[in-house]
């Protein structure tokens, strides 16, 4: 990752009663990750209204970085064998249907970091509200050695 200029952020502290990631067997599940940067959301609101799809795609990438930081804190990111599943939630304004393009921000990061092992199953879901009025949230399942 360092070769690609990608740095993992600090693990985002939980905002409720959960942990950032849990391992069971050879799988690590992350909690939903918001696009926190330096302890705060850089932007809030609905995608397709206050937040553009392009901004939201960048935010989804930050969510993915935060998910990798959660994995790293539990088992080390070097233990990741493959990305199995990505679930992305997009706080969508009425009529916005570009959820897949937004969540590509996360999917493309996993491809950059893990190559073919970053290819994954995925869901991109439009929702009416997310915690803290976040525009996007991403959770990840990875297989580890």
Image: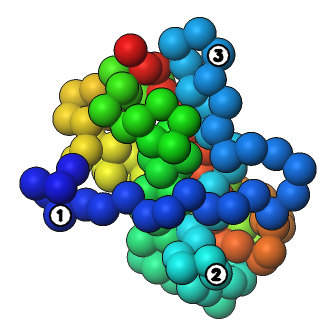
Q: Is residue 3 visible?
A: yes
Q: Residues within 10 Å of mark 1 (few under 14, many from 20)?
A: few
Q: Is residue 120 visible?
A: no
- Mark 1 secondary-structure assignment: loop
Provide the residue designation for mark 3: 24
- The answer for how far apart the CA atoms under marks 2 and 3 are is 30 Å
* Front residue of 75 and 102: 75
- Mark 2 secondary-structure assignment: loop
The mark that comes first in sequence, 3 or 1, is 1
Task: Please provide percent x and percent y for residue 95.
Answer: 70, 71
Q: Which mark is residue 40?
A: 2
| Quadrant into which the C terminus falls | top left
Point 34% across, 44% down: residue: 110
- The answer for how far apart the CA atoms under marks 3 and 1 are is 31 Å
Q: Residues within 10 Å of mark 2 (few under 14, many from 20)?
A: few
Point 31% across, 32% down: residue: 78
- Mark 3 secondary-structure assignment: strand
Q: Which mark is residue 5?
A: 1
Query: Left of 116 or right of it: where is 133?
Result: right
Q: Give the answer, above or below, for where 76 lies relative to 63.
A: above
């Amino acid at each position: 990752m360092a070769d690609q200029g990608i740095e993992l952020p600090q693990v985002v502290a939980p905002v409720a009663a959960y942990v950032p990631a849990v391992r069971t067997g050879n799988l690590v599940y992350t909690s939903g990750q918001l696009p926190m940067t330096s302890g705060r959301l850089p932007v809030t609101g609905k995608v397709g209204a206050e937040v553009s799809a392009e901004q939201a795609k960048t935010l989804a990438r930050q969510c993915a970085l935060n998910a990798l930081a959660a994995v790293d804190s539990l088992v080390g990111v070097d233990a990741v064998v493959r990305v199995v599943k990505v679930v992305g939630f997009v706080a969508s304004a009425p009529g916005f249907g570009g959820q897949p393009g937004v969540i590509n921000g996360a999917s493309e990061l996993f491809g950059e970091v893990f190559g073919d092992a970053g290819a994954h199953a995925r869901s991109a879901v439009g929702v009416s509200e997310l915690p803290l009025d976040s525009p996007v949230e991403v959770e990840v399942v990875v297989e580890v050695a």
